Amino acid sequence: ILFVEYDRKFAIIEMMGEWNDTLYNDVMFLKRNIIDHLIDSGINQFILIGENIFNFHSSDDSYYEEWFEDIEEGWIALLNFKNHVLNDFKDANIDHYFLLGGELDDQSWRTYSPENLFNKIETLVQRRIG
């Protein structure tokens, strides 16, 4: 977790390595041990930075669906994920739980303060869902 702003209800999380739901059910670990606690604290907008996710191995979509349903008024934006990882998300049919692609694929997030990054991503998200 890089940053959480409880008043504005957002979290920025950088992901690294391999995302393996097949062998290790990584999304279950993420959901139960991190995301659920953030949601219980009122967080409903998530920015996941994935430029350092090198592999994704899918299983079922249960935890993605649960996460999506738990944040009724919120969203999950994927920033800078590699194309082959996004394609794996699409192949696993979990891409519809996330906002991804387009300008979200090429953000120089390190040059922004957390609040400014959130403002920029929120603007992009609002254009898509508005």
Image (cartoon, rainbow, N blue to C red):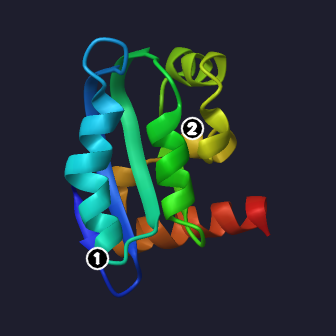
Name the outermost residue toward the right.
Answer: 130
Is residue 38 or residue 55 the one in the foreground?
Answer: 38
**Which x, y percent locates residue 80?**
48, 37
Q: Quadrant of the N terminus?
A: bottom left
**Which x, y percent locates residue 64?**
50, 41
Q: Tell me if residue 35 comes above or below residue 101 in the rendering.
A: below
Q: Secondary structure at mark 2?
A: helix
Question: Residue 4 sits in which quadrant?
Answer: bottom left
Count of labels in the image = 2
Residue at 70% across, 68% down: 126
Residue at numbered disc 1: 41
Q: Tell me if residue 50 comes above or below residue 129 in the rendering.
A: above
Q: Tell me if residue 22 comes above or below residue 39 in the rendering.
A: above
- Apparent side of residue 23 relative to residue 81 in the rendered image (left or right): left
* Crowding near the residue tagged with mark 1, few <14, some 14–19, many ≥20 C-alpha atoms within 10 Å: few
Q: Is residue 108 visible?
A: yes
Mark carried by residue 105? 2
Residue at 30% across, 72% down: 40
Is residue 94 or residue 63 the one in the foreground?
Answer: 63
Residue at 76% across, 63% down: 129
Question: Residue 122 sits in which quadrant?
Answer: bottom right
Question: The disc labelled 2 sits on which kind of residue?
Answer: Asp
